[in-house]
Amino acid sequence: MGEGLSTRLPDELAERLTGYTFSKHPYNESQATIYVLTSESEPRLYLKTRSDQTNRLDSEYQMLKWINQRVPTPEPVYYHKESSTEYLLTTEIKGIPTYQVKPSEHKTAVRILAMTLRKIHSLDPAGCPARHTVDNWVKTLQEKKIDVSSLGDWRPEENLCFTHGDYCLPNILVDNGALSGVIDWDYAGLADPYADLVSCTWSIRYNYKTEAETLIPYFFETYGIDIDEEKLGFYRRLNELIP
């Protein structure tokens, strides 16, 4: 079972995963380690483990339950914390991340990114279990002894909605030119849409290079927003500070 596993599983989880083979996923999500679980008779699963005091995987587990497939996401199967280690088990989302699509498919991917983000931001936020306002982020950063002086004294007006929190190309999967799912929801919560707009446009520029000069305006147009450059700049500076 644990050929590719580098951590001991809780007894209940180990029993649940009898018959599965583990392989380490090549993409590590920040401080989490991801395993792909395969079985001859059962659907493929994904296991995340994380050892710190952030409870990020619990946040993702609660968020996936709250979203309840209103946008396509992995289904939360199991969560457990033992000592300082968290374990999150989810179903698989088939497809490839948008940063891996062929160059000829970049514009289609950007259209999907914009339309999906618009849908996420349109979800009814009632009962959302997390809140990530600017004041909350500044307080968290200051508690971590991170210098926030680059933000200046001005604060933008916030229009809170449900946000993904890490809306970048590796986290949006496509299959045959259509959205297949959105993953990695541990930073999700109520925030201003610009938090996601900044993450996505940074990721488009990073992954699509020179094409970004035309694709980013197309992204904003498809999403349906006239950008406030001052507000965008503020959220860029904030995004650079968030660990």
Image (cartoon, rainbow, N blue to C red):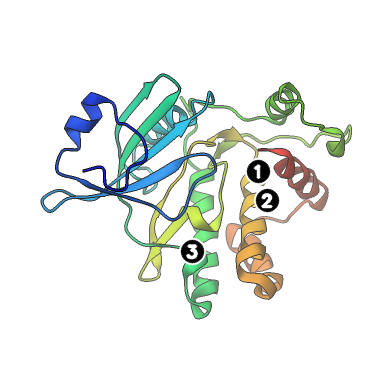
* Residue at the spot 30% in from the left edge and 50% down from the top edge: 92
The Cα atoms of the two marked residues, 3 and 1, are separated by 19 Å
| Residue type marked 2 | Val
Quadrant the N terminus occupies: top left
Q: Which mark is residue 198?
A: 2
Give the mark, 3 or 2, whose residue is nearer the N terminus: 3
Q: Which mark is residue 195?
A: 1
Give the number of the mark in front: 3 or 2: 3
Residue sticking out furthest to the bottom: 104
What secondary structure is marked by label 2?
A: helix
Visible residue check, residue 65: no
Q: Is residue 170 above or below residue 71?
A: below
Does the CB distance between marks 3 and 1 fall below 8 Å?
A: no
Q: Nearer the viewer, residue 175 or 67?
A: 175
Visible residue check, residue 41: yes
Q: Is residue 145 above or below residue 241?
A: above
Residue sticking out furthest to the top: 83
Does the CB distance between marks 2 and 1 fall below 8 Å?
A: yes
| Residue type marked 1 | Ala
Report x, y in % for residue 94.
32, 58
On the picture, is 126 further left or further right than 208? left
Name the residue beneath numbered marker 3.
Answer: 98
On the picture, is 27 further left or further right than 1? right
